[in-house]
C-alpha cells in the first residue's frame, strides 16, 4: 500500500481546509446560535436580536457560503496536484 | 373560480407533468434504475436533492412548529441545513469516488463483510420506512382538506402516482420528476410568503420583512410586536427559548448528523459524473434548500401575528370562513369555557379556549391573509410535491436495499441484470403498498418515530461512514459493533422515553443528561464512535486491499463510471 508524497500532501491540505471550515460551521451555529445566544440577543441587528438572527437566518447563509468556499478550494487543490478529471 | 376548482386544476396539471416525465425517462438498465445512468448534471442533481430532502415536514410542519415555539424551533432550521455542510465536506465526494449504487454497498465493501452489509441494510430499511409512512399520511391530509376526499382515498391516489413513476422510471424517473417538483414546491412556498410580507411590512422579501417595521403606521418592529403579544398572553417571549441549552445543542447535532447520514440523500450523489460535480451539487442543493429554510421563519412570524390578531378576544361568530373550514377537519378546535362568546387564546391551559394544530399554519396562512383562491390551490400542489418527491426517494432506497444489497449481493449473486431490474421494480411495488398501509392505518407511534429517523441515522450510518473514509485503520469488528451498539441504544431510549414500550413513559426530569429522545441521536452517535474506535484497537487491521481502496477514494482523479456487474 504505497502512498506517494503528493497524495499525502494533498490529503493533509484537505484536512486543514476541513478543520478551518468546520470551525466556522461550529461557531456560527452552535456558538453564536446556541451557546452565546443570550449574550448576543442584547445586540440588535435591525429588527433582529443578533443571537436569534444567527439561529434562524445567519447560520444558514454561512453554511451555503462554506460549501461554495470548499468547492473552490478543492477545485484549486485538485488542479495543483493534477488530481482533477 | 372557487378554491376547489383551482386546486383540482393546479394539482391536475402538476400530476400530468410528473407522469409525462416518468414516461419520457423510463429506466432501461439497473444503472438507470439505481443511479439514473450516472450522468445527472450538478444543477439537476441539486434541484432533485432539494426536493428529495424537503418533505411534507419541511413544507407543511416546520414553519408551524417555529410559529408556536419561536427560538426553540431554530433546531430544525440549523439542524436540517447544517447537515449539508457535513455531507459536502465529509461524505459526498468520497462516496461518489467509491462509485457503487447504495450506502450498504459502501459499508459492505469498505468493511469487507456481509454482516456489515446486512446490518447497514437493516438500518437503511428502519430509517426509510419510518420516514415514508409520514409522507403518505401528509399526502392524505392535503387531499382531504383541499379536494375534500377521504384521507384514505387521498393516500391511495398518492400511492398510484408514486408507483407509476418510481416503478417505471426508477432513479432516472425520480430525478427528473424531483426537478419539476422542486420548482412547484418552491414557487408554492414563496408566493404566499411574498404576498404576506408585502401586506404586513411593505417589504417584498420575506427574510427582510421579518425584521422590518409594521406597515400600519405604528413604526414598531414586527418581532418586537410579536414578543409583546406573546408575553401579554402568557407565552414565552418569541425570540428567546424555553428548552434547556444542552437539549437544543443535542437536537441540532442529531439532526445535522442524521441529515448527512440519511441513505436517500446520500444516494443522490451517486448520480453525478465526477467528484467535482458531487461537491458542487451539494452546494447547489443547500442553496436551493436555503431559499425555503430562510423564508420559513419569516412565514412563522407572519402567521403567528396574523393568528393572534384575528382570534384573540374576538367574538366567535365573527370568525372568517377559513376558521370554520379548519374546524371541520378537527385541526382547529374552539371550546367556549367561560361562555362569553369570545375566543380566549392564552398560554394557560385552564383558560385557553382555542387549540390550533401546528400543521395548519402553512396551509391556512394564505386564507388567514385573505390571498386569492389560486394561491391557496398552489399551496396544496406544493405540499403534494414535497411529500411525493420525498416518498419516491425513500422508496427507491428501500427497493435498492432489497433487490441490490440483499438479493444481488447476498442471496443470488448470479442473478442477471434483467432479472435484478424486475426484482427492483417488484420490491418498489411492495414498498409502496407497505408505506400506503401505514399511511392509512398509522400506528400511533409513526409521527413520533419520523422525528427520530434522524437520530437513528446519526447513531448508525454517520460515524461508520466517516470513520470508513477518514480512518484507514478502522476495521469490520469496530464498525459492526459501533453500528449495533449505536442503533440499539437509540432504539432503547426511544422505546423507553418516547414510545413508552418499557412500562410508563418516565417524565422529562429523568432524561439522561437532560437530553430529549429527539436529541439522543447525538449521544448514541458519540457512543458509536467510541465503541468503534475501542474495538478497532484490539482487533486486526483491515486487509491491504481495503486500505488501498480508502487511499483511492480520497483522491478525486479517475472516478469510475458507476458499475453494475461487479
Image (tube, coloured by chain):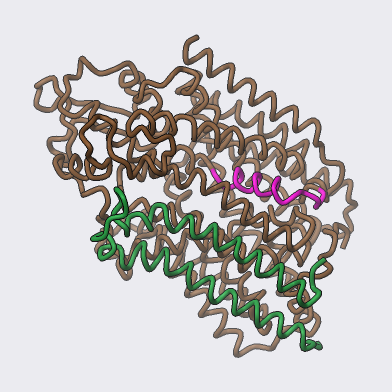
Q: Identify the hue of chain B.
A: brown
Whether residue B376 sits left or right of residue B168 in the image: it is left
Question: Residue B39's x, y, as percent?
Answer: 81, 51
Q: Is residue B137 above or below residue B97?
A: above
Q: Is residue B458 above or below residue B369?
A: below
Which chain is rendered green in the image?
A
Whether residue B261 sits left or right of residue B316 in the image: it is right
**Can residue B440 be seen from the camera position used here?**
no
Residue B93 falls in which quadrant of the image?
bottom right
Whether residue A68 sits left or right of residue B33 in the image: it is left
Q: Is residue B191 magenta?
A: no
Question: Residue B547's x, y, as percent?
Answer: 75, 82
Question: Residue B488's x, y, as percent?
Answer: 50, 66
Q: Is residue B426 above or below residue B416?
A: above
Q: Residue at x 47, y 55 (%)?
A: A60
Q: Nearer the viewer, residue B177 or B278?
A: B278
The span picked out in magenta is: B37-54
Residue B184 falls in which quadrant of the image?
top right
Q: Residue at x 64, y 21 (%)?
A: B13
Q: Residue at x 32, y 22 (%)?
A: B327
In the orientation shown, which residue stands out farthest toward the top? Answer: B1
Magenta stretch mostly in which secondary structure? Answer: helix
Q: Quarter of the image containing the C terminus of chain B?
A: bottom right
Q: Is residue B45 magenta?
A: yes
Q: Nearer the viewer, residue B206 or B236?
A: B206
Residue A84 falls in which quadrant of the image?
bottom right
Question: Residue B267's x, y, as percent?
Answer: 69, 55
**Can residue B233 be seen from the camera position used here?**
yes
How many marks the image carries: the answer is 0
Amino acid at each position: 500500500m504505497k502512498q506517494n508524497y503528493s497524495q499525502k500532501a494533498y490529503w493533509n491540505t484537505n484536512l486543514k481546509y476541513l478543520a478551518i471550515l468546520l470551525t466556522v460551521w461550529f461557531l456560527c451555529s452552535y456558538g453564536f446560535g446556541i451557546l452565546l445566544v443570550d449574550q448576543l440577543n442584547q445586540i440588535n441587528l435591525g429588527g433582529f436580536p443578533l443571537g436569534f438572527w444567527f439561529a434562524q437566518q445567519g447560520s444558514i447563509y454561512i453554511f451555503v457560503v462554506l460549501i461554495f468556499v470548499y468547492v473552490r478550494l478543492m477545485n484549486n487543490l485538485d488542479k495543483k496536484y493534477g488530481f482533477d478529471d | 373560480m372557487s378554491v376547489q376548482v383551482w386546486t383540482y386544476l393546479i394539482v391536475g396539471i402538476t400530476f400530468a407533468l410528473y407522469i409525462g416525465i416518468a414516461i419520457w425517462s423510463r429506466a432501461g438498465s439497473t444503472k438507470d434504475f439505481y443511479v439514473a445512468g450516472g450522468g445527472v448534471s450538478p444543477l439537476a442533481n441539486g434541484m432533485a436533492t432539494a426536493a428529495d430532502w424537503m418533505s411534507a415536514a419541511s413544507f407543511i410542519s416546520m414553519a408551524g412548529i417555529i410559529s408556536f415555539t419561536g427560538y426553540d424551533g431554530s433546531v430544525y432550521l440549523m439542524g436540517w441545513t447544517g447537515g449539508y455542510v457535513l455531507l459536502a465536506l465529509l461524505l459526498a465526494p468520497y462516496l461518489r469516488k467509491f462509485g457503487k449504487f447504495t450506502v450498504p454497498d459502501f459499508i459492505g465493501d469498505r468493511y469487507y463483510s456481509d454482516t456489515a452489509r446486512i446490518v447497514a441494510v437493516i438500518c437503511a430499511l428502519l430509517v426509510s420506512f419510518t420516514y415514508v409512512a409520514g409522507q403518505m399520511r401528509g399526502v392524505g391530509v392535503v387531499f382531504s382538506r383541499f379536494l375534500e376526499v377521504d384521507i384514505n382515498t387521498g393516500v391511495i391516489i398518492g400511492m398510484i402516482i408514486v408507483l407509476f413513476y418510481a416503478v417505471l422510471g426508477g432513479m432516472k424517473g425520480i430525478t427528473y420528476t424531483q426537478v419539476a417538483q422542486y420548482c412547484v414546491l418552491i414557487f408554492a412556498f414563496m408566493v404566499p410568503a411574498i404576498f404576506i410580507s408585502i401586506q404586513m411590512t411593505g417589504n417584498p422579501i420575506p427574510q427582510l420583512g421579518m425584521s422590518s417595521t409594521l406597515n400600519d403606521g405604528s413604526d414598531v418592529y414586527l418581532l418586537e410586536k410579536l414578543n409583546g403579544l406573546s408575553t401579554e398572553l402568557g407565552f414565552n417571549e418569541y425570540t428567546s427559548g424555553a428548552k434547556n441549552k444542552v437539549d437544543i445543542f443535542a437536537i441540532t447535532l442529531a439532526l445535522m448528523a442524521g441529515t448527512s447520514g440519511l441513505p436517500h440523500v446520500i444516494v443522490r450523489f451517486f448520480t453525478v459524473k465526477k467528484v467535482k460535480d458531487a461537491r458542487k451539487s451539494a452546494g447547489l442543493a443547500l442553496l436551493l434548500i436555503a431559499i425555503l429554510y430562510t423564508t420559513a421563519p419569516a412565514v412563522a412570524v407572519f402567521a403567528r401575528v396574523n393568528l393572534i390578531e384575528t382570534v384573540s378576544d374576538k367574538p366567535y361568530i365573527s370568525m372568517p370562513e377559513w376558521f370554520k373550514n379548519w374546524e371541520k377537519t378537527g385541526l382547529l378546535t374552539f371550546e367556549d369555557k367561560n361562555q362569553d362568546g369570545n375566543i380566549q387564546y392564552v398560554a394557560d391551559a385552564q383558560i385557553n379556549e382555542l387549540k390550533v394544530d401546528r400543521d395548519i399554519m402553512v396551509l391556512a396562512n394564505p386564507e388567514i391573509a385573505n390571498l386569492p383562491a389560486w394561491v391557496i390551490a398552489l399551496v396544496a400542489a406544493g405540499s403534494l410535491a414535497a411529500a411525493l418527491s420525498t416518498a419516491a426517494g425513500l422508496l427507491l432506497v428501500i427497493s435498492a436495499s432489497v433487490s441490490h444489497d440483499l438479493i444481488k449481493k447476498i442471496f443470488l449473486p448470479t442473478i442477471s441484470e434483467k432479472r435484478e431490474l424486475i426484482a427492483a421494480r417488484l420490491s418498489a411495488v411492495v414498498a409502496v403498498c407497505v408505506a400506503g398501509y401505514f399511511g392509512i392505518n398509522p400506528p400511533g407511534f409513526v409521527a413520533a418515530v419520523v422525528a427520530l429517523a434522524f437520530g437513528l441515522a446519526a447513531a448508525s450510518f454517520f460515524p461508520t461512514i466517516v470513520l470508513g473514509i477518514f480512518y484507514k485503520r478502522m476495521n469490520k469488528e469496530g464498525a459492526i459493533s459501533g453500528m449495533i451498539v449505536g442503533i440499539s441504544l437509540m432504539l432503547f431510549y426511544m422505546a423507553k422515553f418516547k414510545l413508552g414500550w418499557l412500562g410508563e413513559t418516565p417524565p422529562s426530569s429523568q432524561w439522561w443528561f437532560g437530553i430529549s429522545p429527539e436529541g439522543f441521536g447525538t449521544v448514541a452517535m458519540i457512543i458509536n464512535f467510541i465503541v468503534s474506535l475501542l474495538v478497532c484497537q484490539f482487533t486486526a487491521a483491515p486487509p491491504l486491499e481495503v486500505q488501498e481502496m480508502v487511499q483511492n477514494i480520497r483522491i478525486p482523479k479517475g472516478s469510475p463510471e458507476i458499475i453494475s456487474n461487479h
